[in-house]
Image: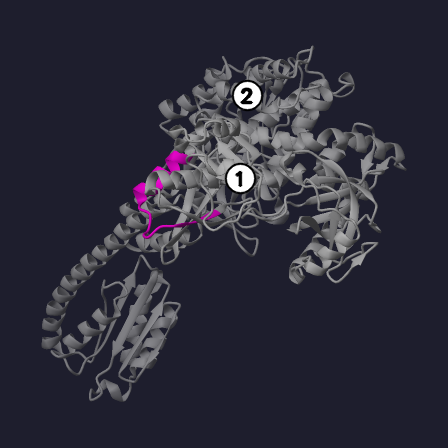
Amino acid sequence: MDVNQIRKTFIDFFREKCEHTFVQSSAVIPHEDPTLLFANAGMNQFKPIFLGQVNPKSEQAKLKRAVNSQKCIRAGGKHNDLDDVGKDTYHHTFFEMLGNWSFGNYFKKEAISWAWELLTEVYKLDKQRLYVTYFRGDPEKGLEADIEAKNLWLQYLPEERVLPFGMKENFWEMGDQGPCGPCSEIHYDKVDGRNGASFVNADDPTLIEIWNLVFIQYNREADKSLRPLPQKHVDTGMGLERLTSIIQKVPTNYDTDVFMPIFAAIQEVTGYPEPYGGKVGADDPQQVDMAYRVIADHIRTLTFSIADGAAPSVDGRGQVLRRILRRAVRYGKQKLNAPAGFFSKLVDVVIANFGEFFPELRKKPEHIKMVLTREEDMFNKTLEKGIVEFEKMIKKSVNNTLSAENAYFLSTCYGFPIDLTTIMAEEKNYKVDIKGFEGLCEAQSEIDRKRQKEKKVELTLGAEANAWLKNHDIKPTDDSFKYQQHEIQSVVKAIWNGKEFVDTAPKGTLIGVVLENSNFYAEQGGQIYDIGQLSFIDDQKTAFDVKDCKVFGGYVLHIGYLSYECDSLKVGDRVELTVDYTRRSPIMSNHTSTHMVNFALKSVLGDGIDQRGSFVDAQRFRFDFSFGRAITKDELIKIDQIVNDQIFKQLNVYAKEVGLASAKKINGLRAVFGEVYPDPVRVVSVGVPVEQLIENPTNPEWANYSIEFCGGTHLSNTKQAELFTITSEETLGAGVRRIVAVTGSEAAAAMELNKELEVRFNNALKLSGSDLAKEIVCLLDLLKVVTVSASVRMNLVETLKEVQALQRKQVKEQEAILAQQAQAYLEKTSEELAKSQPKVFVDLVNFNSNTPLITETIKKIQTKSPMTAIMLISPDEEKGKVTCIGIVPKDSEISKTLTANAWVVKVTEVLGGKGGGKVDVAQGVGSKLDKIDEAILVSREFANAN
């Protein structure tokens, strides 16, 4: 039985035999649950049900029984297996969790009997190798042993294989508060013919837990007490990889057909001579098999997470993914001699193996590869140098410990995550000063926070400063290297403190450094500046952190601060320049896309479009242009389509300096209105070599391409932009419009959100009452903060108008129904009271919280019984409150002893609320709907007693 059959058998068993509903795995990126970095358990998507927060009109609310196989990642946060992956044969960052659930339906008897039947009769596992555990209780916490589960298991197993354990092993809690309960684990002994009881929960790889049955029967209150739940639930989870290793009768998870095809692909793309051998620890001295395991695990994690909308980045889950990728790339390069670019080539085997059950993998394989290729390329630029530097540090280290300063240097200069440095040190039997490293990180964060508050005094080179540089024979900076993606070496020619040039840079002060040459892009032409570092060539220590970069009269000013490990930087020092290419990559994507969108605007809106400005950074870009009206939804869709067509055609991007006169003759050329261009000028062409443009400048075919004058940094091929979408369009004033757009991972995330929100907004049309009112508030808030395609936003706004119209219609219908009910009640009650003329009348009505209707009804009744003190109490189930209104006629007999405000206050106390008013008219509101009967009795007693 292969892994796909094993998964299918589980799902079919519960769906067909046990009448469960199959629920597709949720995304591994829990967009709607800010408490989680990644989905780390099968129950994550069902939390609203367990917490009683599920929308009663949603599909989830209809579930009684469910089954699925959930994609899970445990890396970062509370559940983190990253550091152990590769070292043994049973840890993973990505895994599948098979699960079945009961939501207030069946409980322990069914869960246990079905688990036993599936394992022993369907999967045919050896009954003699199965052990189970149950909760033994905790008297100190007032918890009894789960004798019910124990007795159920004793129907299938002898007592010596039904084992009691404590809170740690056999009591599950969602958090400090919330649903919880005892659990029962099923363990399997991979060694035949022994008594394995002592190995259960002993972290022994030969006797492993395969299935956990959680019986949710309590709620943990804020005061830590346990309250029995009115409805009991079942939540089970079984690791697919572990189950597969047992059924396929192989030693470990990594020996199954989950991983073996990936291992074969790893050998192929790396060219390593030996296949995966399954060795661990001392048996794997070169850590070859460890590298196989790390890479195989990590490519699954990254492929699934990127397919679900995540991407490596500098913080949050993106930072975790970047660590995972760099860990895999380092193992591949250092242990398997893998060539550059090997990692993204493994995406295909993951999709081939898992794409049938998880079709989302097949939707954007090129996007996944592109993200991985870009990240791998960025890391490869510093990986080899970082490894060399690490080796030097190890030789100089004392007490077998790599210093915090060295670890921090590897992190900031070479992009080595601390866990990667720790692993490399462990391989040499060294430790890392983690505590010191964390202290340095926090100290640097504090410095950065202070600098942000100061937010820099703008450093500029005025005419006098420029003249000083020329008078001292300092030539303008040669920054032609900015178009190349690699480090260069240079010499410090001048240091500017904002007032004067100095020979030595002061510590802790914002300064500008002028270099002989530079690969940094200085902010100009609408493109944001580069950031990075200057390092001393001799010892590679970081000398200077470049936080900004500007150009004045040809002199590039690198603006920033001395590094924490640098005491001084002097004129004449030789330095190596390292640009943050990870940051620059999306900037290039966005800049090239401004050219493509300029072309698309002309194609859709006509030749009268002129660029009026732009700004490009790493997150998005804006583009201003002349046009006399708002762009329609259809036009926005066409513009998106034209740019994405250019991306999908994978057009090469060419750039070359040519004479200005010759360049101006190129047919189809786009230039910024009013801009003065240098001679020679740099021509950037998307799809056609510049040489061809110059050879035949009047060719009408050139009008079908994006051709512009531009000095910015650009992609080498449009495919590197991955995806594009416009996220907003607005007016800047008469005749000028602005669009904001995103590319790459930002665009992919926006498009994923497009689908999610369109579904959510359309689902709102199925709601009613308070559910609809609450959802409208949520949808309005969402529209303020989410980044989606501008055309989709227009659709969402239109849908929201329909939703709001639906709410208005429902309100009117409800008001009409209430008015009819009130009229019927009025006629009936007026007739009764007209005959009896009581002193006091108290009644329950169903007018929700419609205060005017309740008040008007009382007054109309009193026209037939003018001396009667009347109180009406009306519950509103949807809003969870009770309204009571009392009117005591001023000239009535009862008014001498009863006031309306005292009457209402007394009644609302019972209802858990507050009230008040005048002696003749008062009202109040409470929240205890279960106290209405008592409130009516109290109301009558209080009024009659007076």
Q: Residues within 10 Å of mark 2 (few under 14, many from 20)?
A: many
Residue 87: % across, % down: 71, 25
Q: Residue at x 49, y 16 (%)?
A: 123
What residue is shown with label 2? Answer: 243
Of the image marks 1 and 2, the number of the one nearer the N terminus: 2
Instruction: Name the residue: 78% across, 51% down.
Output: 494
What is the CA distance from the residue labelled 1 to the residue labelled 2?
A: 69 Å
Q: Are marks 1 and 2 in contact (CB under 8 Å)?
A: no
Q: Position of residue 166 (x, y in %)?
A: 63, 38
Q: Does 537 appear above or below 799?
A: above
Q: Residue at x 46, y 16 (%)?
A: 5
Q: Is residue 502 left or right of residue 258?
A: right
- Residue 337, quarter of the rendered image: top right
Task: Residue 548: give its label.
Answer: none
The foreground one among 29 and 846 is 29
Q: Nearer the viewer, residue 690 or 322?
A: 690
**Quadrant assignment, res 883:** bottom left
Would you say 662 lies left or right of 80 here? left
Q: Amino acid at mark 2?
A: Leu
Q: Is residue 79 visible?
A: no
Residue 926 within the segment the image draws in magenta: no
**Magenta-colored span:** 622-643
Is the residue marked by circle 1 packed among few (<14), some (14-19), or many (20+) residues within 10 Å? some
Instruction: Point out which mark residue 660 bears.
Output: 1
Disc 2 on helix, strand or loop?
Answer: helix
533 on left or right of 103: right
The reply to whether residue 34 is in sight is: yes
Residue 5 to residue 858: above or below: above
Q: Nearer the viewer, mark 1 or mark 2?
A: 1
Rendered view: 610 above or below 719: below
